[in-house]
Image (cartoon, rainbow, N blue to C red):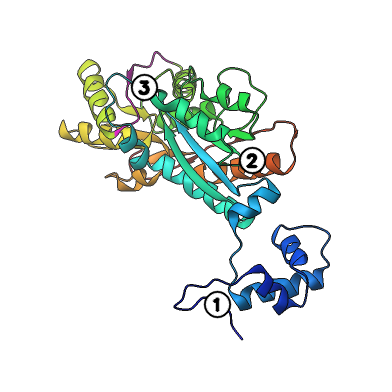
Amino acid sequence: MSTKPGRGGHHPTMDQVAAAAGVSRATVSRVINNAASVAPGIRDAVQRAITQTGYVPNVAARSLVTRRSDSVALVISEPDRPDDHSFLNRIFTDPYFGRVTAGATAALRPHDVHLVVVPTDASDHHQVIRYLRQGHVDGVLLISSDECDPMPGQVHALGIPAVLSSRPASPLPVSYVDVEQRAGARLAAGHLLARGCRHLATINGPLDIPAAAERLDGFRAAAGQAVPAEAGDFTRAGGEAAAHRLLDAHPDVDGLFVASDLMAEGALRAIQDRGRRVPDDVAVVGFDDSSAALECRPLLTTVRQPVEEMAGEMAELLIAHIDTPGRSPRSVIFQPTLVIRDSA
């Protein structure tokens, strides 16, 4: 007989599960809390009884026993920029953050761990730190791009398990996952040179973001020439404006590396607005291989960083740190690849 809730809203109890399984209430509790001392046959019987009755464990009560929330936070820490009035809009429209969320969620799901997305800038760092300190989550996946961002150090000081999305700007004993940024930029330079481009240029991201600085350094080192650069802000509009400035100052540019696909989408618009053809007059290579690369016309040749796989690795590292307190930090570095499409 089913004991699932009816119109009266009465929910099955742990005692009813125990009766259905023919075990004690304490045994049901041990199964729910994943105690290792329960025999496999008894565990199976209790799981069947839970399904039969429709019992839903009280998460709050369970957390008192396990001292776990079964949730982790994805903290997206962004710097304050004087000309930036769209912090949240940028976070929720930039494909990069969506890819990180998707990759982390897919990796956490088999562990029955939920992801809580927590965007923050400098104005509410204190609120985020208070939230983490109160034990709402078991660990932190931290995206921090600014080399002066205090958030990595603040999270580490809390003693909560954490994994960073890139190599920390200042030495910290924390695990992180990154991509070889300079190698990706070298792939872009080599491809443009192999196409016969002789007047290379680049649109870089903000240089207080280590990844942007590394992409610029890698491209210039591989280009073997003095490469003009214009700064963008990792947005479409920023890429378009930077491309106009670049073409005004260097109209002979025939090979352009843009440090993100979103900026490259804007740069393509600027090039085409000036009546120049891509790739015949100007070949363009982006960076990320995000959904924006497929929205470009022509389709964008780009350096792929495997964001979903990297986020999944971050999540697995974090679970390992949660399950094994005191575990030594690890770093995992992914290699980029070049995805050739129509723009170069």
Seen at 45% across and 26% down, the residue is 125
Please identify, in this view, whether the residue under mark 3 or under mark 1 is nearer the observer: 1
Front position in the image: 176 or 299: 176
Question: x, y (%) of residue 195?
Answer: 39, 33
Which residue lies most toward the bottom here? 1
Q: Position of residue 293 (x, y in %)?
A: 36, 43
Contact? badges 3 and 1 (CB < 8 Å): no
In the structure shown, which secondary structural element does the residue marked by tag 1 occupy?
A: loop
Instruction: State the residue in front, 222 or 240.
Output: 240
The quadrant the C terminus occupies is top left
Alpha carbons under labels 3 and 2: distance apart = 27 Å
Nearer to us: label 1 or label 2: 1
Q: Which residue is mark 3?
A: 80
- Residue at the disc numbered 2: 318
Left or right: 326 in relation to 296: right
Q: Amino acid at mark 2?
A: Leu
Residue type highlighted by circle 1: Lys
Q: Quadrant of the N terminus?
A: bottom right
Q: Is residue 106 left or right of residue 341?
A: right
Q: Earlier in the sequence, mark 3 or mark 2?
A: 3
Q: Earlier in the sequence, mark 3 or mark 1?
A: 1
Magenta part of the chain: 225-235
Query: Quick one: 141 or 30, which is closer to the camera?
Result: 30
Residue drawn at 42 percent across, 40 percent down:
96
Mark 1 is surrounded, within 10 Å at the Cα level, by few (under 14), some (14 to 19) or many (20 or more) other residues, namely some
Q: Main secondary structure of the magenta part?
A: loop
Name which residue type carries label 3. Answer: Asp
Q: Which mark is residue 83?
A: none
Q: Residue at x 54, y 71 (%)?
A: 11
Check disc 1 and report the residue beneath it.
4
